[in-house]
Image (cartoon, helix red, strand yellow):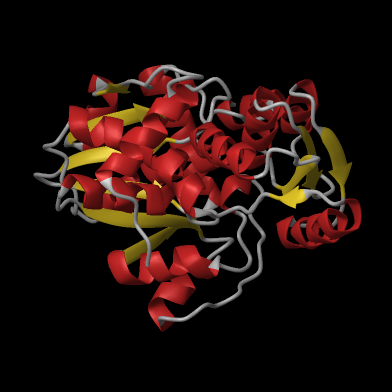
Amino acid sequence: MYLPTIEQLDSAARIVYGAMLPTPQHAWPLLEAELGTRTWLKHENHTPLSAFKVRGGLVYMDALAKREPGLRGVIAATRGNHGQSVAYAARRNGLQATIVVPHGNSSEKNAAMRALGATLIEHGAEFQESREHAVALAARDGLHMVPSYHPDLVAGVATGWLELFRACPEIDLVLVPIGQGSGICGAIAARHALGLKMEIIGVVSSHAPAYQLSLARRAAVEAPVTTQLADGLACRAPDAQSLATVLECVDEIIAVTDDEVAAAMRLLFKATHNVAEGAGAAALAGALQLRSSGRLAGRTLGLPLTGGNVDSEQFSKILR
């Protein structure tokens, strides 16, 4: 298991802050009333791409450009936010980005990636098929394949957690959504680098439970993906590196349904007037589940609103 040092995280933060400001964390009274405990909401929906992924893309692409100055271009597979991050960071470093998405992907996320200058290719019915196609195109066209998980991505993502933990060191419980694992590994990295002891609980979709099943079995388990709402959690097969970190450092992963995610999206809008995509509301959905079983009493909670990139038509239906 590899975790970056505090010096490496501060170096990553300097790269991130060349493109954006730190995001805020707020203790929203209506949200705290609903959860019954002190709660800090970390607004990663306030980055330039309205998602935490941009941090990892900036750090990864900065290191890649230095390692391979003659690089022709990059390619990545995504359901949206990772692709936006790759396109944004590639453009800042003078590289062309190609992004492969599954058919039926969010039309507004697709439009955002094109607006960032990416060449968009639709292939496959779900993420894993898109990823396999991207790997094939990388070999054919001489492109660099940007993975969904990498130590540089983790270091970048961890800078958001570093901001939260330094601002609110009293937090003793955080819930973190899990897609391919960079988010929860970033939280683990920041906790480790700062020498803190708060509990970290992972949150997956009930309709994409690969990481939860893998933690229970202590080995990689593939599982079908059927979520219609939390596309950022649509993981069929765990990443080997991130899973190793999760198995060593996380004691619990809970699962939330699409209905629970939708309820959390509505609550975030009502209590904070912030828009959350499905995966972005998953941590709150998990907290509401823990509240119902009395597990939040006396805790100081940290929750990330990891992204706000939800299609407008879908969000209007959820609010209604």
In the rendered image, the quadrant that contains the C terminus is top right
Q: Determine whether 14 is above or below 9 in the image.
A: above
Q: Would residue 120 appear left or right of 48 to someone viewing this image?
A: right
Label count reads: 0
In the rendered image, the quadrant that contains the N terminus is bottom left
Q: Would residue 190 appear left or right of 20 to someone viewing this image?
A: left
Q: Residue at x 79, y 25 (%)?
A: 117
Residue 193 image point, x, y percent? 23, 48
Q: Would residue 242 appear left or right of 167 to someone viewing this image?
A: right
Q: Residue at x 22, y 36 (%)?
A: 165
Q: Residue at x 60, y 60 (%)?
A: 235
Query: Closest to the observer: 106 or 157?
Result: 157
- Where residue 225 sits, quadrant-wise, is bottom right
Residue 31 image point, x, y percent? 29, 28
- Where residue 116 sits, quadrant-wise, is top right
Q: Is residue 291 visible?
A: no
Query: Closest to the observer: 126 or 63?
Result: 63
Residue 218 image point, x, y percent? 40, 81
Q: Is residue 237 visible?
A: yes
Query: Closest to the observer: 12 or 78?
Result: 12
Q: Determine whether 192 is above or below 92 in the image.
A: below
Q: Residue at x 41, y 17 (%)?
A: 21
Residue 146 image point, x, y percent? 67, 49
